[in-house]
Amino acid sequence: MSLINLIDFPSLGDDRGSLVALESHQSIPFDIKRVYYIFGTQKGVSRGFHAHQQLKQVAVCVTGRCRMVLDNGKQREDVWLDSATKGILIEDMVWREMHDFSEDCVLLVLANEHYNELDYIRDYDCFLNYFVGNEK
């Protein structure tokens, strides 16, 4: 089973431009409780390098592009996010890294919970150790 779960968002619009609507339990498969975006990432800088114990997220590059790496402790996959009409669902207990940000990249992230530092796993070895004796 692939870790890459892309969501296609319908683009609405006319000769004035385009619009993408992101709605809880419609285009986004959960209640949206937090929204943030990453921008201005310097060339050569990577971000992420963590997992969440319970948090689910959808990430969308609303402009520019970046490469998302997902890892569930057994397999590791990467995908380019480069379209405002395509998002990626990131489940809980999935290690995530973001690399190769374009200069104009704006990465929008929608989360099903509010920020909680205790939900983060920031050490990759600790993340892998979770799976020893545990099957997800």
Image (tube, rainbow, N blue to C red):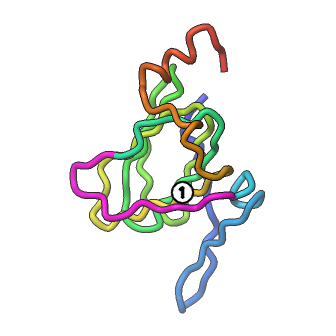
In the shown orientation, is residue 56 left or right of residue 106? right
Q: For this rendering, which residue is in front, 29 or 78? A: 29
| Residue 25 place in picture, x, y as percent | 77, 57
Name the outermost residue toward the left: 43
Q: Which residues are magenta?
A: 33-46
The magenta stretch spans residue 41: yes
Q: Is residue 107 left or right of residue 133?
A: left
Residue 11, image x, y percentages: 60, 72
Q: Amino acid at mark 1?
A: Val
Residue at 54% over, 58% down: 86
In percent of width and height, residue 64 lies at 37, 64
Above-or-below relation of 111 to 85: above
Residue drawn at the location 55% of the way across and 34% of the way down: 3
| Residue 135 as seen in the image, left or right of residue 100 | right
**Foreground residue among 19 and 90:** 90
Quadrant location, the N terminus? top right
| Secondary structure under the numbered disc 1 in the rendered image | strand
Q: Dividing the image into 4 quarters, which one contains the C terminus?
A: top right
Q: Position of residue 62 (x, y in %)?
A: 47, 67
Q: Mark 1 Cα within 10 Å, few/some/many (few <14, many 20+)?
A: some
Frontmost residue, 118 versus 126: 118
Relative to 118, say whether 27 is above or below. below
Find the residue positioned furthest to the bottom. Answer: 16
Task: Return the residue nearer the eye: 113 or 87.
Answer: 113
Residue at the extreme right: 25
The structure residue drawn at horizontal position 36% and vertical position 46%, both measured from the top left corner, is: 47
Residue positioned 29% across, 50% down in the render = 100
Tell me the quarter of the picture where residue 102 sits.
bottom left
Count of marks overlaid on the render: 1
Q: Which image quadrant is residue 20 in?
A: bottom right
Residue bearing the label numbered 1: 109
